[in-house]
Image (tube, rainbow, N blue to C red):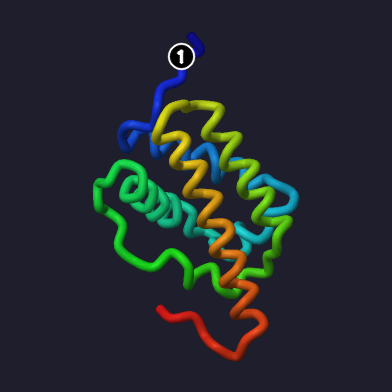
């Protein structure tokens, strides 16, 4: 037995989010982008991410808002999303296994594909993202 359990409560979400964004902040490809945009608002960003993943994975509706608009103008492309997903999946595997852990990976993949598609669309269009 490896001692891993599934994602089951807000404490698990916080462990996942804190560890993941700890990796993001020092990552050579992603760190400067995230730190440049978030600056000194990391506590607020992490709190929002707890609520987002708590809503998505635990079906405890604490997040209200649109996740895409803040990302619409980021200078990112496929390689950034590939790294994001690598770190996301690695962090999940570090601590968790089970249905919710698998769902977190699946949702991360879907979100990355959707965000990249929308970012590329708006980059090549005169349209502005809907808020």
Q: Nearer the viewer, residue 44 or 119?
A: 119
The residue depicted at 73 percent of the width and 56 percent of the height is: 79
Where is 53 relative to 34, above or below?
above
Residue 31 coordinates in the image, percent (x, y): 66, 53
Residue 33 coordinates in the image, percent (x, y): 65, 61
Residue under pointer 1: 3
Query: Label 1 crowding class (10 Å Cα cut-off): few <14, some 14-19, many 20+?
Result: few
Q: How many marks?
A: 1
Q: Nearer the viewer, residue 118 or 25?
A: 118
Q: Is residue 67 left or right of residue 114?
A: left
Q: Is residue 11 left or right of residue 67?
A: left
Where is 10 relative to 42, above or below?
above
Q: Quadrant of residue 89?
A: top right
**Among all residues in the image, which is located at the extreme bottom?**
126
Q: Nearer the viewer, residue 8 or 25?
A: 8
The residue depicted at 55 percent of the width and 45 percent of the height is: 21
Q: Nearer the viewer, residue 48 or 3?
A: 3
The residue depicted at 68 percent of the width and 58 percent of the height is: 32
Residue 99 coordinates in the image, percent (x, y): 40, 32
Quarter of the figure that contains the C terminus: bottom left
Where is 91 relative to 31, above or below?
above
Residue 80 coordinates in the image, percent (x, y): 69, 56
Q: Is residue 37 left or right of residue 129?
A: right
Q: Judging from the image, what secondary structure is the residue with disc 1 in?
A: loop
């Amino acid at each position: 037995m490896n001692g891993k359990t599934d994602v089951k409560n807000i404490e698990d979400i916080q462990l996942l989010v804190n560890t993941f964004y700890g990796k993001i902040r020092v990552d050579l490809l992603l760190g400067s982008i995230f730190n440049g945009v978030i600056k000194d608002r990391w506590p607020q960003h992490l709190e929002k991410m707890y609520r987002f993943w708590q809503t998505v994975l635990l079906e405890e509706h604490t997040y209200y808002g649109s996740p895409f608009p803040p990302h619409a103008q980021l200078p990112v492309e496929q390689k950034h999303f590939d790294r994001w997903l690598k770190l996301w999946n690695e962090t999940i595997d570090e601590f968790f296994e089970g249905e919710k852990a698998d769902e977190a990976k699946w949702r991360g993949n879907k979100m990355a594909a959707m965000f990249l598609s929308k970012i590329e669309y708006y980059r090549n269009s005169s349209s502005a993202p809907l808020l």
